[in-house]
Amino acid sequence: MHAMPDACRRLARCTTHVLVLGTLLLMARAPDAFETATTIPQEQAMFVESDAYERFMGRWSRRLAPLLVTFASVREGDSVLDVGSGTGALAFAILEAAPSAHVTGVDPSIAYVRYAQARTPGDRVRFQVGDAQALALPAATFDRTASLLVMNFIPDPAKALREMIRVTRPRGVVAAAVWDYGEGMEMLRVFWDEAVALDGGVAARDERTMPLCRRGELRAVWRASGLQQVEEEPIEIALSFTSFDDYWSPFLGGQGPAGAYVLSLSASARAALESRLRARLLGPGGDRSFSLRARAWAVKGIVAER
């Protein structure tokens, strides 16, 4: 092998120095972006920007969360784990319903954890970065473990459920809710109907194809895990939009599969989709407020004695 010429060695060293310097600058100026790029799995990379998520889905999560808290039978004094805690909607709803409860939230996104922690009202709730499929928590720690709008995004939901059961005490409750993407979540149903009408090739990206979003699917996973007294029921809220822009602009934040799809479009394709959605939602009249239905499937089960 020939020796590397001096000029090539100098170029290699310079290139290395530039790469290192660039990495250090990214870590210093945008630590959230660096953390996301290096630690967040691809399946979760569409959920990393906390303010954009709040505009897109967080405001509706906060409306749905109290219904899951009631369904999960959270009581005063309970120790509760919130798996996939996001920006804190479920954790804060738990404290609202049961002020003496203690809540731990776990989420893979450091940006979401920081956002939620900054809004924590006291010492009864804490948030930490973690993976639902490998919870860094002791066994039989919590009275209730719950997950809001997350299970269908976890690469191995059965593995995550086993972890949720492991950290829950015997006779404790494990509960979750997932949007009914097929029919019941109209905000996204309308979006994907019009996207597919414009380009049939994106049908595979339609969230109706996601797992665990149809009647009976969550119940089947809960029963297969060995949980007892499994119950499933729909929970529903209304999504009220003040204008078309109140509906459309959150998609431009790139959050979730729909937001990621919007950002992938050319300017002309994005304008065409916006036009179809405007016509679908507003009809021939001018801009106005409107409401859409949003249904989720909720499931719960009891942890068996060990």
Image: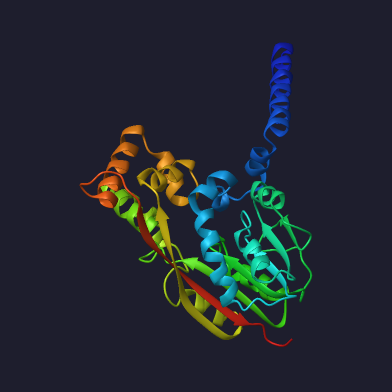
Q: In the image, residue 257 lies at what x, y percent?
A: 45, 51
Residue 22 higher or lower than 298, as above or below: above
Residue 303 higher or lower than 278, as above or below: below
Residue 92 visible in rendering: yes
Q: Quadrant of residue 290?
A: bottom left
Task: Identify the residue shown where x is 60% and y is 59%.
Answer: 89
Q: In the image, residue 133 lies at what x, y percent?
A: 65, 64
Query: Is 283 in front, or is 57?
Result: 283
Q: In the image, residue 169 lies at what x, y percent?
A: 74, 79
Q: Residue furthest top?
A: 7
Q: Quadrant of the C terminus?
A: bottom right
Q: Is residue 145 left or right of residue 153?
A: right
Q: Quadrant of residue 102?
A: bottom right
Query: Is 271 in front, or is 91?
Result: 91
Q: In the image, residue 44 lies at what x, y percent?
A: 57, 52
Q: Residue furthest left?
A: 284
Task: Identify the residue shown where x is 54% and y is 54%.
Answer: 58
Task: Identify the residue shown where x is 63% and y is 41%.
Answer: 37
Query: Is 212 in front, or is 144?
Result: 144
Q: Quadrant of residue 186?
A: bottom left
Q: Is residue 52 left or right of residue 39?
A: left
Residue 127 higher or lower than 36, as above or below: below
Task: Identify the residue shown where x is 73% and y is 70%.
Answer: 101
